[in-house]
Amino acid sequence: MTAVTAPAPVRAPAGLTEHEAARRRAATPRRRPPSSRSYASIVVANVFTVFNAILAAFAALTLLFGDPRDALFLGIVLANAAIGIVQEVRAKRALDRLSALVAPTATVVRDGAQRRVRAEDVVVGDLVALAPGDQLVADGRLLDADGLRLDESILSGESRSVVHAEGATVRSGAFVLEGVATCEVTHVGADSYAGRVTGEARAFRHPRSPLELALNRLLLTLVAVMAPLAALLGASLALRETALVDAVPKATAAMISLVPEGLILLASLTFALAALRMARRGALAQQLNAIESLASVDVICLDKTGTLTDGAPHVVATIPAAGVEAAELEVALGDLAACATPRNLTLAAIGETFKRAPRPTAARVPFTSRRRWSAIELDGHTLVLGAPEVVGSPAQRAAVAAETARGRRVVAVASAAPGLPRHDPDAGPPPGLQPLGLVVLGERLRQEARETVAFLRREGVEVKVLSGDAPATVAAVAADAGIAVAHAAVDGSALPDDPAALRELALRTPVIGRIAPDGKRRVVEALRESGRYVAMVGDGVNDVPALKAARLAIAQGSGAQMAKVVADVVLVGGDFAAVPGMVAEGRRILRNVQRVAKLFVTKAAFAGFLIVTVGTTAAAYPFLPRHLTVASTFGVGLPAFVLAVAPSTGPWRPTRFLRDVAGFAVPAGVAVGAAVLAAYLAALHGLGFSVAAARTVATTVMLAGMLFLIVALEHRPARRRHLVELLALVLAGAYALVLATPVAREFFALVPPTPDVLAASAAGAALAWALATAALRITAPLRSGATT
């Protein structure tokens, strides 16, 4: 495959006028593609779930055949859904505002001048100027092309890039990897691929996060347990020919406690709130699970420029070659910066120091990360700019080594005979190079880089730098940022072909320089194959292959459009210091959702125990549905909501989720269930209480047991444990208020708190605490540990 080095276009088309463009835009109005979930999808996700459908079915049966007050749990479900919808809508609006800052744009030629416009403002007939990193936002025909290479994997699934020449047809959705071109737009909106770019760009990646996978397994497990229990209960009721008026309350009370109605709501709510918090810090989570996923990351790979450094290189010095005057070198540098296209950061920095007027070029070769050199033919001679090992001479090696050891970047300048030939994209520079000298570029370490790297190391996250700069330069900057560089940096141009050797190198090496885009991808893939959870931070086209290969892709907001489109998270302000906050937020989500899940699964284990022990007998069930509504609200629902959004510290684990949750919930649920059943039967048969009084005792003991477990989930620090204890007391007080209020007490079918009822309830609560403590202590060795 050959690249095309075309002469500069002899024409300079003026493009459409602004008036004509506005007329065409008005004739074919288009809406901006959605930048986040639609309002309809938010409502559907929070309302129409499997568990809500189960609860709605039991509510309908209760309304038809039972007491409407026993359908109160349906109102709780709707209230939970409403809370989730409101919070997700708030997060959506914040994300939409940030999305507008990183939305795809295009450079169009209007009235003879280039200007940047929104993708939806491009119209048929527009001339679009293409440069590396740009995304094609409309279909079109190339009027001219200079070394244009496109990534069309979104359209064709083919990972190899494609070279296009003048006259070729290109389609929206592709990205410019190399070269420049001018494209005349032929199709926009629904007539092109543009409307499908956002979804298709992300469809090939974004695996589920560890927490999402764990929650899915948990829900499948609960459904698998619910089905046989429901069958057992139904068969028992049918065999005893229980009347509907008695069967419906009993079945409803038994089954609704098995349903973790708020678990998924709270998980999605924590995602939404985390996205909202990060939006306020200038980080756009393009996938709601991205922040949680970052908590699981144990390796972060990043480019040097724009991440550790401020991304704005400046000329530190020039070193003329032997026999070359400084003025001659400076003129050559000024001509390169003024006439070469596209103008990257290196050329921009050189142009700021050595100003020259732009002039027409006879031919040019754009810079690429693979080639590592660029050239222009100007005034009968050729100027070449590139890496010293490609363009420089042996005599310059000592100077290059001295500067790179100081963390500076060095590029070489040389001249050659006129007549740039057509060439293979991977071939070397023109023959007969005459060195003109070196230009030394410096970059300032970001103010927050050291603190960010130190935080990540404390959190057990390994930081690796993958850069196209010289290994010594990258190693010096990495060491300055606090990254442990135990050995010399590796040269990425000679990565091993053997997969095992590459994995070993990737695992032990913190710094790799002179690495090509495909090399970055191979290193990230090798780390993934070694079982590491890899995040990639980048901003340029050369980072895109690695961004696609990573489990989590983070792009700088100032980076190329291509990088931002494939990213899970965009740092809109380009602030790498936002990453620690994202890590902390993700780990808070893991801790909180895990402990909230323990509460909901404990309630399900409690319900399963009662179904097996008393639900299949002819005895009156210990609860009416409304009893479970009040006990679950104060004992599970409200505390779970508070715990899900509260700050948390301590260990976290994205693995062994089911074992950890079940190891707490099953013994705790069985212990509380045994205490409730013992207190209920003792009150009913031993103390001669009425069914209503015995049910009041059972409800009180269940609530006391659940509040005890909330406190038991907290181990440290002491201050937060005291706050949780205070929360439990407040919830207990709210329940006491229900008992003390005649209207509320009558509504929930509870009896007044007489001394006998209080004494029986206190004894049952003490039994619940004792059994739960013993059960958790005995099963502690079987659990993987508790999250706090």
Image (tube, rainbow, N blue to C red):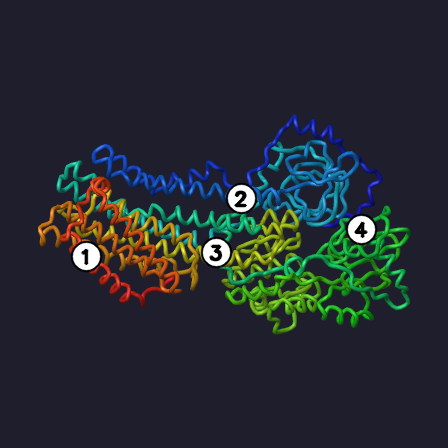
Residue neighbourhood size for the residue with mark 1, other residues' Cα within 10 Å, grouped as few (<14), some (14–19), many (≥20): many
Kindly indicate the quadrant of the structure image that contains residue 108: top right
Q: What element carries label 4?
A: loop
Disc 1 marks a residue whose amino acid type is: Gly
Q: Residues within 10 Å of mark 3 (few under 14, many from 20)?
A: many
In depth, the one of 747 and 453 nearer the eye is 747
Residue 751: x and y, percent? 17, 45
Residue at (36%, 64%) from the top-left corner? 715
Residue 472, image x and y in percent?
A: 69, 69
- Secondary structure, mark 1, is helix
State which mark lies toward you, 2 or 4.
2
Which comes before the other along the chain, label 2 or label 1? 2
Query: Helix, strand, or loop for circle 2?
Result: helix
Earlier sequence position, callout 3 versus callout 4: 4
Q: What residue type is labelled 3?
A: Gly
Residue 19 quadrant: top right
Task: Tell me how far mark 4 sits from mark 1, CA to CA.
Answer: 83 Å
Q: Give how far across and how far down residue 51 sits, in percent.
A: 33, 43
Q: In this view, does 68 lie to the left or right of 272?
A: left
Q: Which residue was labeled with disc 1?
A: 764
Report, in whole angstroms, how far the alpha carbon at label 3 lies from the one at label 4.
Answer: 44 Å
Q: Which residue is drawn at 40% across and 42% down?
A: 83
Q: Residue at x 36, y 54 (%)?
A: 596
Callout count: 4
The residue mark sitting in front, 4 or 1, is: 1
Quarter holding the C terminus is: bottom left
Q: Which of 284 and 137 is in front in this view?
A: 284
Q: In the rendered image, which residue does mark 2 sit on?
A: 94
Which residue corresponds to mark 4?
Answer: 340
Instruction: Tell me if I can see residue 253 in this picture.
Output: no
**Dot 2 and dot 4 residues touching (CB under 8 Å):** no
